Image: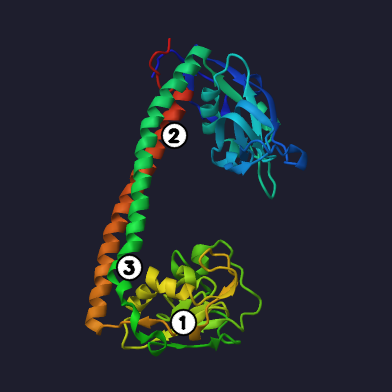
């Protein structure tokens, strides 16, 4: 850290000092033509080309319209709350949810993009149902200003250093993807072979249809998801309100198999962790005592069993494409799927092996995600230190 430093009155620097040779200015003196993007109209259509579209959450897709060309800084008016600031070059269309700015002569756009990204623009957002930041708010913000030579040096330094970190992050993200695929394959390897032969499911389960009525109103609401199976709704959603009338909701007991019939063909099922209420559209199945409930639930989440359910979905559209309108699987059709049920010791052994392999994979995933988090923190700290002058960047005069 340099010894020749001074403090500024810039609030977002939170007391950090900057090199004494740096000056201080406002964003409005560093950019020109700062304005929100434009809503697309029929007159904007350009049949000869396709250009990226930027909105409040960054790159969103493609369109035949564009309203900007060249190198610009894009700020998501709502995405600014999480550092959504991008430097874009080329022809593009920016929606009204993005702010577009061009730097003035003597300002390095790469440096300013990094600076805006670490300024936590979200704290200046307007208070509304959909918070967002406006051009006037950004323009008035004070910032430290190195010389152009220093701006370029900082941008070059960050370009090199963050590239190394990004390679590490991408490698770990790729590893997480591979491990996630492997996690799904494990169930197929261990239990998938049990699907398609043996007893029909209807001999292993019994559908129960107990309604809440007036006596069960205090039971927790349970939700069924593809990702987490069956959990209390207040554990997975901030929306804690209950319907005024729960009398028609189904009651399930701890250990019952609950199936979201609309998403069954995607694997939305699981064991209830406790007694509770579930949607009247769900299916609640009591598992026969001869079958280990954990083993059966795991078999029913294998790709092989899910594929069998997908063939039995009734609705308009295609189950394979996930576009069935109001899809449902009937319990009667579900019961026709065959499962080769081994003796109980074998069931427990297979469940134990599945848990062992999944636990090993989950540990590797957790480690990789930890490395990603540390790398992202390192990347953010590196940028903050460079653009605020806390780090002496090489080749700076």
Residue 167 on image: x %, y %? 36, 36
- Circle 3 sits on which residue? 188
| Disc 3 element | helix
Q: Position of residue 330 (x, y in %)?
A: 52, 82
Relative side of 33 to 283, left or right: right
How far, Cα to Cα, is label 1 from label 2? 50 Å
Label 2 residue SS: helix
Q: Is residue 22 left or right of residue 203?
A: right
Residue at (42% x, 32% y) in the render: 381
Q: CA distance from mark 2 to mark 3?
A: 40 Å
Q: Which residue is mark 2?
A: 380
Q: Is residue 365 above or below residue 50?
A: below
As drawn, 156 above or below 202 = above
Q: CA distance from mark 3 to mark 1?
A: 19 Å
- The coloring applied to the image is rainbow
Query: How many C-alpha atoms fall within 10 Å of the one at disc 1: few (<14), some, or many (≥20)?
Result: many
Q: Identify which residue is drawn at 57% across, 30% down.
A: 88
Residue pointed to by mark 1: 334
């Amino acid at each position: 850290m340099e010894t020749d430093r001074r403090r500024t009155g810039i609030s977002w620097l939170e007391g950090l000092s900057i090199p004494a040779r740096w000056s201080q200015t406002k964003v409005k003196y560093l950019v020109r033509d700062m304005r929100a993007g434009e809503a697309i109209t029929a007159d904007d259509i350009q049949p000869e080309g396709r250009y990226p579209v930027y909105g409040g959450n960054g790159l969103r897709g493609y369109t035949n319209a564009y309203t900007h060309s060249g190198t610009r800084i894009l700020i998501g008016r709502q995405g600014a709350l999480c550092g959504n600031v991008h430097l874009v070059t080329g022809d593009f269309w920016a929606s009204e949810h993005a702010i577009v700015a061009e730097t003035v002569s003597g300002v390095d756009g790469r440096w300013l993009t990094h600076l805006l990204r670490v300024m936590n623009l979200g704290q200046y957002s307007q208070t509304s149902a959909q918070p967002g930041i406006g051009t006037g708010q950004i323009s008035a913000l004070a910032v430290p200003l190195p010389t152009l030579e220093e701006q370029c040096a900082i941008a070059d330094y960050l370009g090199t250093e963050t590239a190394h970190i990004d390679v590490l992050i991408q490698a770990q993200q790729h590893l997480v993807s591979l491990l996630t695929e492997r996690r799904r394959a494990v169930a197929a390897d261990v239990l998938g072979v049990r699907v398609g032969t043996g007893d029909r499911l209807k001999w292993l389960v019994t559908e129960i249809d107990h309604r809440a009525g007036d006596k069960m109103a205090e039971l927790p609401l349970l939700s069924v998801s593809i990702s987490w199976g069956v959990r209390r709704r207040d554990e997975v959603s901030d929306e804690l309100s209950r319907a005024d009338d729960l009398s028609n909701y189904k009651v399930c007991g701890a250990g019952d198999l609950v199936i979201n019939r609309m998403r069954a063909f995607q694997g939305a099922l699981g064991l209830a962790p406790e007694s509770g209420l579930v949607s009247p559209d769900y299916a609640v199945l009591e598992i026969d005592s001869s079958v280990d409930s954990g083993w059966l639930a795991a078999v029913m989440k294998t790709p092989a069993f899910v594929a069998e359910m997908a063939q039995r979905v009734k609705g308009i559209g295609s189950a394979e494409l996930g576009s069935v309108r109001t899809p449902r699987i009937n319990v009667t059709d579900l019961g026709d799927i065959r499962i080769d049920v081994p003796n109980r010791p074998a069931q427990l052994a297979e469940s134990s092996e599945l848990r062992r392999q999944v636990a090993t994979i989950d540990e590797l995933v957790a480690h990789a995600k930890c490395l990603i988090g540390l790398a992202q923190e390192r990347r953010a700290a590196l940028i903050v230190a460079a653009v605020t002058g806390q780090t002496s960047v090489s080749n700076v005069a």
